[in-house]
Every structure is written in C-alpha cells, then in structure tokens.
Image (tube, rainbow, N blue to C red):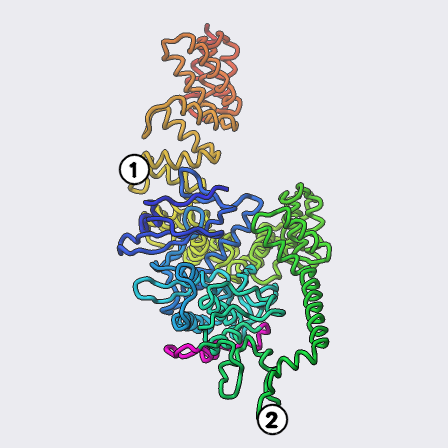
Amino acid sequence: MTHQQLQPGALLQAGKYRIEKILGQGGFGITYLATQELLNRRVAIKEFFMRDFCSRGQDTATVTLGTDANREQMERYRAKFLKEAKVIAQLDHPNIIRIYDIFEENGTAYYVMEYIEGESLSQLVKRRGALPEQEAVACIRSVAEALKHVHSLGINHLDVKPGNIMVRRKDGRVFLLDFGLSKQYDAEGNQTSSTPLGISHGYAPIEQYTPDGMKEFSPQTDIYALGATLYYLVTGNTPPPAGELFTHKLEGFPPTVSSALRRAIGRAMRQQREDRPATVEKFEALLPAQGQPKKKSGNRRPSKDNPEADDETTRLHHEADETPEGKGTPRRNGFKRFFQSNRKKIALIGAGVIALAIVCGVIYTSQPSYIYKQALKAYEAGNYDTAFKKFRQAAEKGYANSQYWLGEMYANGEGTARNDTTAIEWYTRAAEQGVPGAQNNLGEMYESGYIVPKDDAKAFELYTQAAATYGYGKAQYNLGEMYYHGRGVPKNYEEALKQYRRAAQELYPGYAPAQFRLGEMYYYSRGVPQDYAKALEWYTQAAEQGYAPAQCKVGEMYLNGDGVTKDLTKVMIWFTKAAEQGYVIAQKSLAAAYQYNWWGVKDLAQAEKWYTKAAEQGDVEAQIELGEMYHYGTGVPKDLAKAEEWYTKAAETGDAEAQYRLAQMYYYGAGETDDRAKAQEWYPKAEKWFTKAAEQGHVYAQYTLGYMYQDGVGVPRDHAKAKEWYTKVTEQDIVPDYARHAKARLEELENH
C-alpha cells in the first residue's frame, strides 16, 4: 500500500477545516496541523490511516481501508480509533488533551483535538538528557492528576509513557495523550470494552503481557507505567522490560536522585500488582515534596539515623548487614563475613533462582497464549510467514483463537497458499470451541454455498451460536437477516428486529448495517408501524459511522421531507459524504443534481467529476451519461474519442441503450464525414451495435436497422431484413410514433 497523506490546503467537512501540514505519522494514523476556518483556530486532526494496509488515490482524498481479505479487520481498527476519540471526549481535565470534533469523511475517520505546541517528554529528554529530580517529579504530579480523573471514571489508560505525554511550550503545562489502548470498566470493576493487546516494553507491567491480565479495573497497572516514566525522566534510560525485574534489580540511578524517589519508583514498579500503591494518591504520597533538596545516596550504609540510605532498590543487600534485633551496635564488616561464611549456600540459592527463572521463562514462552500473542503481533506487522508458523504452532496445541486466525490465513492466502478446504477445517475447530468469528464465517459459507453445500439451516445454527457473544454485531446482524428474509427459519420480523437491535446497540457505536436495517424497517413499516422519526434516528446513527447507504438515505429524507423539514443543504452534505466513500448511487445522484439543477446548484464540472467516479467503478448509467457529455460537449470540451471509450465500456456489458448510443455515434459520424474511407469503417460498426441493441428489443435500434437495410445506408440493401426489423417495431408498439412510421415503411416495401 502507498503512504499518502492529505496535502496542505485540503479541506475537510465542507471547508470547516483546512490542512496546513503533517505533524506525524504512526502505524495507525496521520496527525495534521490544521486551521478551523470560522474560529481561525489552530487544531490537530488525527486521521485513521494504517500505513501498511490503507491507500489513497492519487487524485482524490478518499481512503481505501485494506483489501477484501482484511477489510473487516480494518473496520475493527477504525472502530477502535473512534472509540479512542470518544473516550478522550468524555474526559474534562486541564492535563488531558481536549477533543473538539469527531467525524467520518473520505472513507475513513477523523477527530479534531486541541493543538499542543511543544514536545513530548521523550523528545525533551533526548534533547536535554535526564531531568533534575524536582522538574521530573513536577511533570509526574501533573500526569498523576490526569490519571486520578481517568480512574475516577472507571478507565485504565494502559499506555502511559514519555512519548504519550506532551509539555506545552508557552507555559510548561503537561498533557496526557493517546487513549488508544484504554479500557473501560463498570461500577463493579468488570471490563465493558475490549481492545487488542498493546505493549510498550519497559512501561507495561507483567499483567499486560497476558490476554486476560486486564479483565478487571486496576489503577496499579497505570501506576507501574507512571513509575517507569519517572525512572526514564531521572535516568534518561528506558526501564528494563517487566519480565527482567523478576531476576534483576532496578539500577542505573544517578547519585543525585534521592533515596525517597528511588523508593517511590521501586514501589510503583513492583512485579506483583497488589504490592504496588493501590491508588494514584498513595503513589503521590511517596514522592518527595516539591522543592525538597535532593540528597545524594552515594554508597552510605543504612542506619536508624540515616533511613534514606535504605534504598528500595538495594534493600536486600542492606538487610544482610543490619544490626541483629536487640543488639545495640552493627557488626564490623558484617556483610563481608556473612557472605564468606555462607558463600556455598548463596551460590546454590542463586543458581536455583536462575534455574527456576529459566524454567519459568521456557514454560511461559511455550504457552499457546504467549505464542498466539507473538503471532498476532507478527500478523499486524505484515510478517505473514512468521505469523502463520506461530498461529499453527498454537493452533495445534488447541488454542482456539489461533485456530480461527489460521483459518483466516488459509482463506486469504497469507503466509501460505490459499486453501479454502483447510480454512474450513480450522474454522470448524475454532467454532467448536466457541470462537464467534469462526462460527460467523462458517455461517456465511453455508448461507452462500461457498466451498460447502448451501445449507441455510446450518448457517442459522452457526449464526445463533456466534450471536450469543455479547457485542458481536456482525453475527447478530446476519441472524437478523435470516429472520428478515426467512432463510433457514420462517420469516419473523419481530425476531429480526430483536437481533438488529442487539447488533445496533450492544457495543458502542453499534454495527452500522444493523442500524441501517432498523431504519429501513421503520421507514417502510416492515414489522413495525411506520415511524419516520425513528427511521431517521437509526439511519443517522449508521450514517455518522460512515455507512454510505445510510448517508444516502438520510439525504433522501431531507430531500423528500420525510418526517423532517426539507433541507437541500443537508441533502448535499449527506449525498457528498456517501459519494466520497465511493457509493455509486450517491455519486450518480450528485452528478445528475449538478447537471440538471435539481437542488438549486448547477455545476457541469461537478457533474462530470461524479459521473466519472461512478463510471470508473463500472456503473453503466454513469458511463452512458459521461459518453453523452463528451459526445455533445456538455460541460466538457467535445471529445469523440472519450465519448467512444465510455459508450464502448457500457455497451460491452450488454446494455442495450449503451449499444444504441454507440451505434448512433458511428452512424451519424459516418454520415457527416467527408472521409469516405472512415465512413466505410464506421458504418459496419454502427450496424454491429444497432443489431446488438435491436436483438434485446431496443425499438429505436430496430427502426434504424430497418431504415439502413431499406435504403442501403452503410450496408447492402436488403428489403427482407428491413421488413424483419420494421415488423419487430410494430409488434412491440412501445413507441407509438415509431410503430406508425414502421408500418408506413412496411407499406412502402410491399408496394415497391
């Protein structure tokens, strides 16, 4: 895929925002500096654009989300992107970046946020080196304030790190950014949203390395990352990955860092979650007071008179050299004598600990869940060969999610040769273990009869199993479709409505096709009383997610005044949104509206633009209209070569009207040219395409052929063929004038 960005000067939301420049691009999106025109305000706009999977046309802003093979996955990531924006939007805090707007356009999603002119803590440390303790603590206290607010709403950030913390240049205010990995929890602390595993090594605690590690709300997870970020600020080094801290102590502190701060960081980064401070407030209480002079830790030994020397990171060493309880004085060279007298025991214990750590590491890395996580990471990075091997390794150990993904890779030919039969085998194994994606995919295969015998009853059974999973909108929608159309089960609008509602509502923002179908049911009174207000509500929910058919339908309702006041401005807005996503119906409607001044705006250049977009997608009507514009020079310079090109594309699909138009072009061109050789070349082409159209019952083509054969225009005179075609015109009697003329011609031939 190409890595293309919006260009400076590009407009979004009908000119509301103007792109100034690119601020940065990551794996999931592009961030732009833009101007909000009416307010003359600088903003940052983040666009969903996975650079390894998305593409943008050379001459358009429209984004294509992946390929047919991975588009569903791209849609999940786009939903995650929008979820990030909506999470931030509900947070109102001076240390959290503000969201101004969320919208979908160009086939992708955007959110508009406060523009922070400054640099991240990561950039700051790279530029200046490790920060003084007082400055570092001040930054962390600001982030802590933001996290307290986040936690009060039952949200874990899960990606606190220096790169996600900005310092505004003008006043030094600190902002917490990037809620893409955040999870929300209910009042009981149970997870209500899900996101893919994301790991920032060095900042993520051990529980984030397992799929089920964050099922419950845990402030301690963010506190670990906060402590790790503080470590980075005062040392200039990324902390070691969480797994290493089982066998290694946290080192690398400059001597200028106080023991109190070392203890605070050590407590925050404890391996066991329950050993960390339970709340951000408790972590803050461990931090040195701002303005407190920093004391050098040096290599001073701990004592009751010097408690700061009892550094958390060297506590075990000090405990070996403490005064025995009840004795009044420390032993001279106590640690040295202790080590010498217990050297063999210490060596054996050390060897045992190392061996245990190695065994635990081997066991952990051989677990299917760990292998699956590595496979998923490789897949998302586009390393399909590695992903395939690891998915297979975990799948053969019975790991259900790996079985599903192995089926996906066989079905799409990723990392291996495409093999639909093997894909079905792995989908079946995963489906038997309750993986809803596998159950749904198998259901679609049985419903369509793809690879397997068509079996609506089996499809219904599989959809029912998958739809039982809370929030699995696609399966719920498919089950609703079975009830709606009566496939595999008697038609039942009530049950269809129930499943559509589940798909539309269970998991925010809902499954857009189900929302659209609910709009259809209320609009056309299918199983429910007609209710334009509810229809518009459901259509709008789907439209706001970027579902083009719904955007088109909302536009139609404002055009017709169905339950709303007619509003041509909204008509244009919604049809344009749908058209920009490549929705052909909207593109043709826009083109015709601009061509014939339907909605109060005549603009032939816009008409040509939208007809072209629809025509390029193979729409025959648009190809004919475009051919006609170039044929007669309507709104574009007359160009017979382009007219011929578009007419031919449409004619070759078998469309009779296109065949007639192409034949006409050759017929009249041959009749008007002074170049007899060219005329002799064109008349046979005209006869060929008139015949194709006439054989499909096109009256005008039949009459013209009769005329050509009667008078020998471009073809040998043949009265028998002329009578044949005139007779077909009279037999159809579809166009009375032509039928009358054909009868007159037949009489001429009879009297000849």
**Magenta span:** 271-295
Question: Residue at 38% across / 61% down in the picture?
Answer: 99
Residue at 59% x, 64% y: name it: 209
Compared with 112, 212 (above or below) is: below
Identity, as a three-letter code, of the amino acid under mark 1: Lys
Q: Give residue 415's quadrant in the image.
A: top right
- Compute the Cα span from label 1 to label 2: 99 Å
Q: Position of residue 103 (x, y in %)?
A: 40, 54
Where is mark 1, residue-wise? 602
Rendered location of residue 146, percent (x, y): 41, 70
Measuring 73% from the left and 54% from the top, which residue is drawn there?
396
The residue tagged 2 is 327
Q: Secondary structure at mark 2?
A: loop
Mark sitting earlier along the chain (1/2): 2
Count how many numbered circles sit on residues in the image: 2
Question: Which numbered mark, 1 or 2, is in the foreground of this view?
Answer: 2
Tell which of 133 and 424 is nearer to you. Answer: 133
| Residue in the picture at 44% in, 17% down | 704
